[in-house]
Amino acid sequence: MADADLLRHVRELFERSIDVKKAVAMNGAGTIVEIACALVTSLRSGGKILLCGNGGSAADAQHLAAELLVRLRPHIDREALPALSLASDISSITACANDYTYDGFFERMVNALGHPNDVLIGITTTGRSPSVVRALRAARARKMTTIGLLGGDGMPSLDACDIALVVPSTETGRIQESHITAGHAVLELVEDLWLKNATAS
């Protein structure tokens, strides 16, 4: 591939990412607000946020959990908010994969750690990840609020979600880029709403 072709490829990649994010901003802003409000409602009720995903989505789950536990913006000083990425414990992951199946790992963690005031955020770029689908179904059975950051047509995860942001793309990279942008938007709203409530009280 010639240098000019490489440059064009990179620019087209960025343009596709921009186009997908514009579509999410246009059609998904209301969903992002709804997700943020659901998280704040859970946190105010003494609940916690569980997150799960595989591969790059596992990294996104850890990323977003860290920003709840610590903070997102350096100029915002607030208390820690309870959040846990279910993909962080390699001993439990490998034990479950060895003794049972990997597909049931997140489901098992939800059954052990989830309570009715809690939220599960399942992240899957296809909507078809068996481990995430099973976790969302388990969370729903436990009366938790289920939230999906999805891609493609979102199915079958979409059916197990109370609220879902479905990125209108089938490109894994473009979906993940939109997921983390949407995640940051959600957490900025959470921080703002949390601090507003603290000030009001």
Image: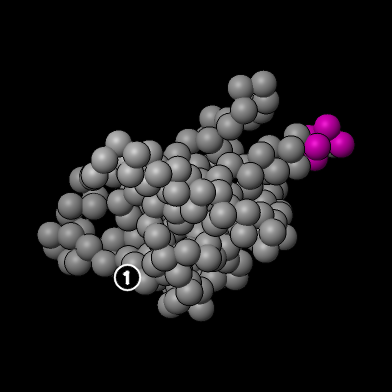
Q: Is residue 130 visible?
A: yes
Q: Is residue 115 visible?
A: no
**Quadrant where the C terminus lies?**
top right
The relative height of residue 199 versus residue 169 in the rendered view (above or below) is above
Q: Residue furthest left?
A: 98
Foreground pick, 190 / 94: 190
Foreground pick, 77 / 118: 77
**198 within the magenta span:** yes
Left or right side of 93 for 131: right
Tell me the quarter of the picture where residue 193 sits.
top right
Q: Main secondary structure of the magenta part?
A: helix
The relative height of residue 139 versus residue 118 in the rendered view (above or below) is below
Left or right side of 184 for 136: left
Q: Residue at x 87, y 36 (%)?
A: 200
The relative height of residue 19 versus residue 63 in the rendered view (above or below) is below
Secondary structure beneath label 1: helix
**124 within the magenta span:** no
Q: Residue at x 29, y 61 (%)?
A: 105
Circle 1 Cα neighbour tier, 10 Å, few/some/many (<14 / 14–19 / ≥20): some
Q: Residue at x 20, y 59 (%)?
A: 96
Q: Which residues are magenta?
A: 196-200
Residue type, mark 1 in image: Pro
